[in-house]
Image: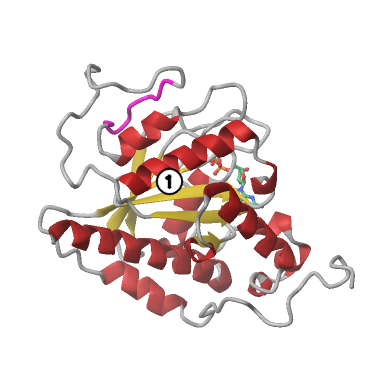
Amino acid sequence: MERQEFPEFDRPWRTVDWGGRDQMETFLRHFQISNPEVSHLRILLHGPTGAGVSSFVNSVGSVFQHRITVRAPAAPKSMPPCTKRFKSYGIRSCDGGRLPFILSDVMGSQDGDKSGIHPDDVINTLMGHVQENYVFNPISPLTAEDPHYISNPALNDKAHCLVSVLSATHVCLLNNSIARSLRSIRFRASELDVPHMVVLTHVDEACPLVRKDLRAIYESRHVKEKMQCCSDILGIPLNQIFPVKNYHEELDTNNDMDALILQAMKQIINCATDYMNDLRQ
Ligand SMILES: Nc1nc2c(ncn2[C@@H]2O[C@H](COP(=O)(O)OP(=O)(O)O)[C@@H](O)[C@H]2O)c(=O)[nH]1
Ligand SMILES: [Mg+2]
């Protein structure tokens, strides 16, 4: 049977609680961090330029504000990337309260022309050595001699979960140097025992079925194929890969986009919490 004729599975291969948006939001607003040294969990996001890192930061902000927010500058694919500085974003709920996690956005890894962040600098940020607003130098990563280097980072400065953001439209076509760099970042994060997840964006562009109805996400063979590419390239299990559609053209938030983003965030926060708890043992 031709796959093109039947692009979907008979039933979703992973469940999403489409009615559980509010419950997931409540969980993420109120979870407690048991370590007194840590005021917030830090989630470090990185990925190839244009994958949707900044859009994911904005999407998470939008979910909790119940309206579209644009704080991290996102750029159309035809433009040079906006993110050159190390920038962290606290997330606020719609009643103005602060959530107990922050999202750190680093400059994208650029294909070919070496203008993106050096993989060593992703690890520097992971380990808490990079000051807020530091402008990354793609040619030479930050070293201990640099005045901007934080020599003794507090647990608050370190990242508690690494998230690679990849685009479903590009992941199967990533060039070797980007794939190698993503693998080396994953390897070094695992040496540091920092959990690692993947957020797979642009699922609407990868599959017409999903573009029409986001609830078909786990029935789509195209999306599963892209998730499998992520898994193969990074050596990461499928259960650490979360497909989402970012807010990018919408003027209002909606239940189904929120549900997928919240499902990813809940898993990211659970893993970051486990990591933090393990540090205390
Ligand atoms: N269709 C679609 N476009 C997206 C999605 N996420 C991001 N974009 C668009 O992709 C482009 C690059 O996004 P950006 O967040 O700046 O990527 P970054 O370089 O990784 O920070 C922008 O034009 C976004 O509007 C998505 O899930 N679906
Ligand atoms: Mg960006």
Picture quadrant of residue 217 = bottom right
Q: Which residue in the protein does label 1 denote? A: 45
Q: Position of residue 71 (x, y in %)?
A: 43, 45
Badge 1 amino acid: Leu
Q: Is residue 106 visible?
A: yes
The magenta stretch is 130-137
- Most foreground residue, 218 or 50: 218
Helix, strand or loop at mark 1: strand
Name the residue at the left extreme. Answer: 36
- The image position of residue 144, as x and y in percent, is 23, 22
| Secondary structure predominantly adopted by residues drawn in magenta | loop
User: Image height check: is 83 above or below 31?
Assistant: above
Is residue 198 shown left or right of residue 87?
A: right
The C terminus is located in which quarter?
bottom left
Say left or right for 278 vs 58.
left
Residue 205: give x, y in percent of width and height.
Answer: 71, 55
Instruction: Note whether 110 is above or below 209 in the view shown.
Output: above
Residue 98 seen by the camera: no
Left-right relation of 151 to 108: left
Q: Quadrant of the N terminus?
A: bottom right
Answer with the quarter of the image where residue 50 lies: top right
Q: Residue at x 18, y 46 (%)?
A: 155
Magenta highlight on residue 59: no
Residue 151 image position (x, y, % from top left): 17, 29
Crowding at mark 1 (Cα within 10 Å: few <14, some 14-19, many 20+): many
Q: Residue at x 70, y 71 (%)?
A: 213
